[in-house]
Amino acid sequence: MPKKRMPKGILGLPSRNMLFSFTHRMGDEWPDEEDDDADDSDYEPGKDLIPMVEDMPRSSDSGSDTTEGGTSSRKRKRKSKTPKGSKRTKREKPKKAKSSRNSMKEKEKTKRKKNKRTAKSSETLSSERETCFGKTVKRRKDLGPVGDTTIGEGDDMWGQRLPVIVLEKILLFAVRETGVVPLLCRVSRVCRLWREASQASCLWHHVALDNGRVKATDTTLEWLTANRIPPQLKTINLNSWTKLTDGSFVALMEACSDVQNISIQRCTKLTNRSLCAIKDQCSNLKELDLGFTGSSLASSPSLRDLLKEKGSTLEEFQLAGCSIISSSQLMASIKSYCRNLRLLDLSNCVVTIECLTLPVEEMQKGCPLLEILRLAGVRVQPANASAKAQREAEGFSKLRELSLAVADNVACQVVLPTNLGPGDEFLRRVLNNSPDLKLLDLRGCALIRLQTLQNLNVENLEHLYISRCSLTNSEGFGTAILPKWNHSLIELDMSWTNYVERDQDEVMLAVSSCHQLRTLNLSGTSVTISALRSIMRQCTALESVNLTSCRSLPRGHKHCYGGKSLRKLRKEIQNVTMSDEDE
């Protein structure tokens, strides 16, 4: 009995079987040669599925449609529609005659439309001159720029008509939000117009490569220097490029002599050769960040030579996390050559031989424009100065931020040691004349007394950090410190403060009087639910509250609050009963 053949689909496969499947080993393979028909014998894997030109139907000028065999397609249709043995009825003959007349009329209409289109196209081909951003350009009404034959009727032409300078302005806004890389690298693959716009030099003036989206190697920096980064580069950020060496960095400095801001944090393989390149090539250096680069750069003679050559234009200088062998030579270079310095960051520096000695009065005279001084996590002490020099010191009159926080490994519940952080003398001499101070960070400072902080000539302090600070243990803290700045404070950190129990109500009353507060940290304190209710009622501008580890609050309230959760806390705290407070 002959094998029954299954009906096949358009691809030669059984129509009842599955052709594609998203699960493994469930789709059907191509049929074997034994089961295949003669029509499928010419199949070759990998052959292009697009029909050849010879197989496509052709239309001649006479209007007759013929195929490769020479037979008319109309005849094929006619044969297929009229089966053998069938006869036409009388009713069909007048319909056919009528349809033939209609087809003749439609042909005449199409010819007239063609003639009209050719006449219109001949009129539109006359070029007109238009001005775009001061340049005269020949344009056609329907096709855009003259000579552009790639745009046809009905195509999307806005991208071709858009001037390059407009596209550059659009990309400039995007670059300011997301950065140069990888935005411009992806934009350059869209089309030729976008590629040309992405290579504009104005987009590559500020390059930040610290986002981890490019390979931080010398090969990458060399390619960018040769193909993308222009000589007009202003800012370069290579933070955390731990494999970067002097060769590619020196080549970048030689190609971009106008660079103003350089950030090479954690580039531990850079040596004095890179500092020499910065000194020789950068004529207008304003910002230099050498944080966490080790002692090879922070204590090298090349750094002192760099400050001597470029210190007059330097505005920001950061050495956070570096190892400094001799602080006296470094501070002497800063006070002597950095006249326009506005930011000095020496936080978390490790002084190997001695603690950091800061010549306060000489620094105030040598750097009168200093606005930000960061000394957090550093063993610092003031240099010796006479009483006359201290009285005649002008102070840091422009200072806005001072950070003296101490990072220690002592648990918050344990009594802090008394030898942490700078003392009263250092704070008094630094803030001798700083009425515009906005931020004061004294976290962990155990040697600063309440009287010194009260006598400071600071009027409008906005950010105060006194976590784990010993001055909160002093009697009268609530009436002496917080009322002084309750009109200006917008951020207060009092976490893990062990204020005197008898002054608890007084301290919380002083906190609630700071009506401008937006951020409040009471973590680890003994704030009660009644005091918290008063703070919530009066400090209406609060946006964030930290109540973690507050031992006097009832269960379910020891969290960080902000946004919707803070609004929910305001409603819930009014319904807490006295029994809940006792719990």
Image (tube, rainbow, N blue to C red):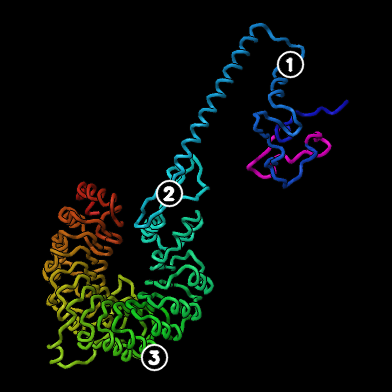
Q: Nearer the viewer, mark 2 or mark 3?
A: 2
Asked whether, in this view, residue 496 is left or right of residue 14, the answer is: left
- Report whether residue 305 is seen: yes
Q: Which residue, given by chain and number where applicable, does mark 1 sit on?
A: 83
Amino acid type shown at disc 3 = Pro
Picture coordinates of residue 201 (x, y %)? 41, 66
> What residue is drawn where x is 38% and y is 80%?
282
Q: Position of residue 37 (x, y in %)?
A: 80, 33
The residue nearer to you, when weighing 405 against 439, is 439
Q: Is residue 377 something that shows in the picture?
A: no
User: Amino acid type of disc 2?
Assistant: Arg
- Drawn side of residue 116 relative to residue 40, left or right: left
The residue indicated by pointer 2 is 139
Question: Which residue corresponds to the image point at 30% horizontal and 77% vertical from the top-left?
Answer: 316
Mark 1 is surrounded, within 10 Å at the Cα level, by few (under 14), some (14 to 19) or many (20 or more) other residues, namely: few
Magenta stretch bounds: 15-39
